Amino acid sequence: MNTELIIKEIAAVDTWQLRHSVMWPNKPMDYIKLKEDNSGFHFGCYVNNELVSIVSLFIKNNQAQFRKLATIHTAQGKGYATLLLKHVFKFAEHKNVASIWCNARANKINFYKKFGMLKTTKTYNKGGIDFVVMKKMYD
């Protein structure tokens, strides 16, 4: 069976259900919405026309931040988030940003290191989950 994989820009509203079900299923839907959603770029990875992974990118001045990277449970571990992040890193680089950063769940640090991201000293806890800020500089 051939698998059709497409990564494309999508509307913020198209990320919300996946964000909610994967990241914070026990919180109200409004918990996963961002006040910046309308000013961001949102990307979806579709496999055979099914949205399986999403991420949002926000650019301010010459800094980019990606947020809300999520993959449906049945598609996790298959490389879709990796493909999506590679796309986002290229997109940000074409926007001539100096750096890209994220608030990484502490248990996902090694995943982000694969992209050349480094841990910073900034950490915090939200909803009982530990986070660390990770950053990558562009040349």
Image (cartoon, rainbow, N blue to C red):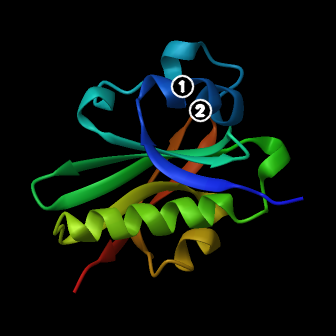
Q: Is residue 62 left or right of residue 74?
A: left
The N terminus lies in quadrant: bottom right
User: Against 110, is 73 above or below?
Assistant: above
Name which residue lies at 36% across and 70% down: 90
User: Residue 114's x, y, as percent?
Assistant: 57, 80
Q: Tell whether label 1 touches label 2 (CB within 8 Å).
A: yes
Residue that label 1 marks: 16
Q: Which mark is residue 35?
A: none
Furthest toward the bottom, the residue is 139
Front residue of 136/52: it is 52
The three-letter amino acid code for the residue at tag 2 is Arg
User: Against 120, is 116 above or below?
Assistant: below
Name which residue lies at 33% across and 30% down: 37
Q: CA distance from mark 2 to mark 1?
A: 5 Å
Q: Categorize mark 2 by other alpha carbons within 10 Å: few (<14), some (14-19), many (20+).
A: many
Q: Which mark is residue 19?
A: 2
Query: Which element is circle 2 on?
Result: helix
